[in-house]
């Protein structure tokens, strides 16, 4: 693991403990039909978002996933043309990285604290930030991670954002990432977000009717649990 600031040491320990507990609980087993619909909706929306924004083929992109977990988002980009040598992932937990390496040995994966990324400035076209900041309670650590993301992001690039917009009544280890909080973390960016994803407990309850009922319920704005979107450089910025 790369070095961490002394101020964030307790927060790093807390995060490691929480995510280790998540692993033991099998929290990320998305077996329900409703959760499968949620994942499909998100995947389709990301594809549309990138197609509309990015002006060149994905095969030319370099992608970094901060908090890459088991590497599923990197796999998504690989399936859409990004070569393995252009796919990078970092995660705080060694267990996540070990599992991701077994699944995707050609990807560039490393255990690291995202407060200090070992990449040069302007290295990536796309940085994936999926449900990372909702887990980080310490403002200084969150600010350090955001600053590092912006440092290694090309001025023509974008942060692909997906995170909670509501607090979770069943998980006190996460907090809502409101538009105000996102703006405070990334004050120099243009932030384009939309609400998406049916509340997961509701999605899980849909059963065999999910293919029909999920789109209907997800069309109700206050039932959408997350924000999805892009954070890009402010107008006038250019690659160095």
Image: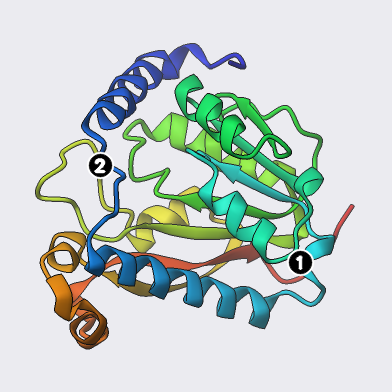
188 relative to 24, above or below:
below
Q: What's the residue at 54%, 24% (across, down)?
A: 98
Dot 2: within a 10 Å radius of its alpha carbon, few (fewer than 14), some, or many (20 or more) residues? some
Measure the C-alpha gap from mark 2 to mark 1: 32 Å
* In the image: residue 124, left or right of residue 135: right
- Which of marks 1 and 2 precedes in the sequence? 1
* In the image: residue 28, left or right of residue 112: left
Return the residue found at the far right: 240
Mark count? 2
- Residue picked out by circle 1: 58
Are the residues tagged 2 and 1 within 8 Å (C-beta)? no
Q: Nearer the viewer, residue 196 or 157?
A: 196
* Residue 209 visible in this rendered orientation of the protein: yes
Residue 80 pos. (x, y %): 68, 66
Q: What's the residue at 49%, 76% (across, down)?
A: 44
122 relative to 206, above or below:
above
Q: Nearer the viewer, residue 27 or 185?
A: 27
Q: Check disc 2 and report its element: helix, strand or loop.
A: loop
For the N terminus, the quadrant is top right
Q: What's the residue at 17%, 51% (across, down)?
A: 168
* In the image: residue 199, left or right of residue 93: left
Dot 1: within a 10 Å radius of its alpha carbon, few (fewer than 14), some, or many (20 or more) residues? some
Q: Nearer the viewer, residue 167 or 23?
A: 23
Residue 114 pos. (x, y %): 56, 31
Residue 118 pos. (x, y %): 73, 27
Q: Check disc 1 and report its element: helix, strand or loop.
A: helix
Q: Which mark is residue 184?
A: none
Q: Nearer the viewer, mark 2 or mark 1?
A: 1
* Residue 123 visible in this rendered orientation of the protein: no
- Residue picked out by circle 2: 174
């Amino acid at each position: 693991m790369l070095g961490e600031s002394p101020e964030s040491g307790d927060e790093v320990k807390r995060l490691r403990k929480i995510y280790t507990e998540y692993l033991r609980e099998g929290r990320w087993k998305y077996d329900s039909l409703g959760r499968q619909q949620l994942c499909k909706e998100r995947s389709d929306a990301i594809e549309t978002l990138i197609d509309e924004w990015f002006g060149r083929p994905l095969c030319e992109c370099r992608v970094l996933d901060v908090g890459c977990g088991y590497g599923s988002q990197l796999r998504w980009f690989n399936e859409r043309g990004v070569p393995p040598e252009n796919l990078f992932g970092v995660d705080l937990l060694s267990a996540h990285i070990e599992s991701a390496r077994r699944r995707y040995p050609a990807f560039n994966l490393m255990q690291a604290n995202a407060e200090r990324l070992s990449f040069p400035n302007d290295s990536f076209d796309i940085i994936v930030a999926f449900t990372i900041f909702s887990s980080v309670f310490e403002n200084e650590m969150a600010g350090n991670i955001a600053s590092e993301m912006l440092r290694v992001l090309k001025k023509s690039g974008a942060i692909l954002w997906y995170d909670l917009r509501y607090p979770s009544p069943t998980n006190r280890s996460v907090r809502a990432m409101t538009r105000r909080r996102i703006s405070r973390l990334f004050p120099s960016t243009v932030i384009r977000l939309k609400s998406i994803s049916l509340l997961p407990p509701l999605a899980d309850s849909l059963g065999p009717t999910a293919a029909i009922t999920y789109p209907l319920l997800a069309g109700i704005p206050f039932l959408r649990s997350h924000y999805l979107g892009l954070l890009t450089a402010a107008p006038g910025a250019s690659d160095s």
